Amino acid sequence: MQNAISRPKSGEGYLLWLIKIMSGVLILAILIIHFLVNHLFAPDGLLSHAEVVAYFRNYPFVPFMEGFFLLFVVAHSLIGTRSIILDLHPKPSVLRVVEIILVIIGIVASVYGIWLLFAVINFGL
Amino acid sequence: MLGQLAQGPEAYDSFIAFAKQPVIMIGELLVIVAGIYHGFNGIRIALNSFGVAVPIQRQLLFGVVGISLVSAVVFGLRMIATH
């Protein structure tokens, strides 16, 4: 860490900083797979509805991958949003309210996204 | 997108038809390139954070910009070809 140029900013903490970095790397890895399968290898540049459902059902790791992708994106974006808000030097009470709102958004987005994922997998069954 | 998929083929197809409008496609390309730049630049910053490749961070930045520009061309051409 001697030559490090980027560290957690004041109020961020190493755990959130590490989650932000690790989720970002994992998002990029899954995003590359997503682009290759859904856009580059797909015949018309996009999978049809039936092809997406089949892709989810035929490869059991895919729903897991997409589910974790969703969770990583939610976590990364909300921690990033908090990080930007920290740059504005909010009062501790304001930051606390913002944190509660971000956690609620994160939980709702994650639960709704996972529910949609199951809806797609079970479509037509 | 998951929401459209969950609603069925009709909702998905109408969304795809909407997304194939030129203005939407340009916006989509900008989002893709921004995402690629953000991702690779994030890796550069993460490496630097752990003290890795700090002396060559300038070259890494040029690499990130290069990857983003090449990706813009590749995805742009692909989008035009499949439009």
Image (tube, rainbow, N blue to C red):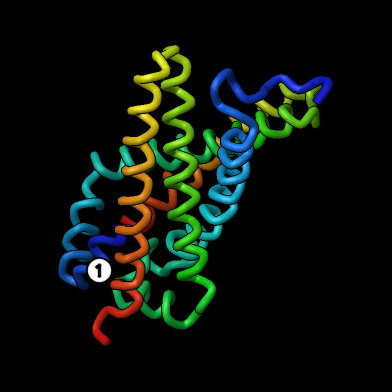
Q: Residue at x 31, y 38 (%)?
A: B27
Q: State the residue in front, A30 or B17.
A: A30
**Residue B67: in sight, yes or no?**
no
Left or right? Give the position of B62 relative to B9: right
Q: Residue at x 60, y 29 (%)?
A: A13
Residue at the extreme front: A93
Please tell me in which quadrant of the rendered image residue A99 appears. top left
Q: State the residue in front, B44 or B62.
A: B44
SS category of the residue bearing label 1: helix
Residue A114, compared with residue B59, is above or below; it is below
* Chain of the residue displaying label 1: B
Left or right? Give the position of A123 relative to B30: left
Q: Residue at x 45, y 23 (%)?
A: A84
User: Residue B70: percent from the left, percent from the top?
Assistant: 56, 39
Q: Quadrant of the C terminus of chain B?
A: bottom left
Residue at the spot of label 1: B6
Total numbered circles: 1
Q: State the residue in front, A6 or A34.
A: A6
Please tell me in which quadrant of the rendered image residue B3 appears. bottom left
**Residue A4: in sight, yes or no?**
yes
Please tell me in which quadrant of the rendered image residue A42 appears. bottom left
Residue A22, compared with residue A65, is above or below; it is above
User: Residue B4: percent from the left, percent from the top?
Assistant: 23, 62
Q: Quadrant of the N terminus of chain B?
A: bottom left
What amino acid is found at the position of numbered circle 1 in the picture? Ala
Q: State the residue in front, B21 or A113.
A: A113
Q: Residue at x 50, y 59 (%)?
A: A68
